[in-house]
Amino acid sequence: MKQPQHKFGTIVEFAKRRIGTGAWRAGERVPSENELSAQFKVSRMTARRALDQLALDGLVVRRRGSGSFIANNGLRSSFMVIRNIADEIAESGRSYASRVLQQAATAATRRVAEELELEVGDEVYHSVIVHLADRRPVQLEDRYVRTTAAPEYLTANLTLETPNHYLQRICPLTHARQEVGAGTPTRKQCEILEVRAGEPCLVITRVTSAHVGLVSYARILAPSSRYRLSGQLHFSSKIGS
C-alpha cells in the first residue's frame, strides 16, 4: 500500500510543480509561511520547513523581512555532505567499530514529535550507538526513526551496518536538515565517550527525509578534540549579486 505523503513534502512537491510548469516565475514572491499554513491546513513550523527545503534545493531565495522569491536558476551546490561515519573513519586509516547501547521502541517526546511531525506518545524506534575509531569513542548517536519509514529497524544489526547506511539502503534519503552547535556532555555521556567532565563537544542535530516522508531525527555528540566538521566553498568568478 502506498505510504501517505507527509505535510512537509506535500508543500514542497506543490511548489516544485508550480515552478516546473512556469506558473511561478523567477523573481516572483512565493506565498508566505502564513499563507501556506492556511492553504494546506498545517502549522507555521511545517510551512517554514518546506520553504527552508526549497531554499536548500536552490529553488527559492529567502530574504529577511521581505519573504521568499523564486530563484533565477534551479541549481545549487551545498558544501555540506552527510557522510557515513564508518566510511569517514576507514578513509582516515583507522579501524571502525560500534557499540549499540539501546535499540527499542519508545514513545515520542514533545521534541521528537515536533521534529518528525508526529503526536506526542506515538511509537518511534530509538537507537543509541557509540561510534569508535581505533577503539576510541568519537561520536555518541541518539536517533529516533519513524516506524512507517523503516518497519524492520529494530531487527537491523547496527554493529555491522550504521543507522545511516541502513536507512540509505532501506529508504534512500533525499533531504537532510542539519544544525551544528556546541555543548558539554552529561556525567553519563562523559563516561560513554571517555572524556573528562566539561570537555566541549560538537552537538549535531539532523532530520532526514526520503520519498516516503520524514525518516529520522538524530542528535550526535562528538568530542571536539576527536571530531571536526569541514567543507569546501567554491566561489564564482562572476561579479554581481
Image (spheres, rainbow, N blue to C red):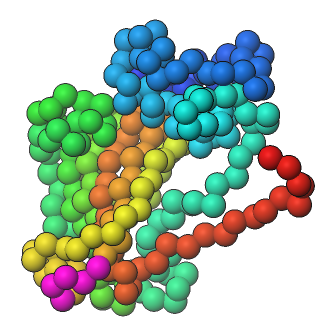
Query: In the rendering, at what x and y percent does residue 93 appear?
Result: 52, 89
Nearest the viewer among 63 and 85 is 63
What residue lies at 14% left-to-right and 45% top-to-bottom? Answer: 105
Asked if residue 23 is among those painted magenta in the image, a careful observer would answer: no
Nearest the viewer among 42 and 165 is 42
Image: 127 above or below 226: above
Query: In the rendering, at what x and y percent does residue 109 appear?
Result: 14, 41
Please indicate whether residue 21 sits to the left or right of residue 230 in the image: right
Image: 21 above or below 221: above
Nearest the viewer among 73 and 138 is 73
Q: Which residues are magenta?
A: 196-200
What residue lies at 70% left-to-right and 28% top-to-bottom? Answer: 70
Image quarter of residue 201? bottom left
Image quarter of residue 21? top right
Query: In the rendering, at what x and y percent does residue 80 appear?
Result: 57, 60
- Tell me which secondary structure the magenta stretch mostly adopts: loop
Nearest the viewer among 108 and 239 is 239
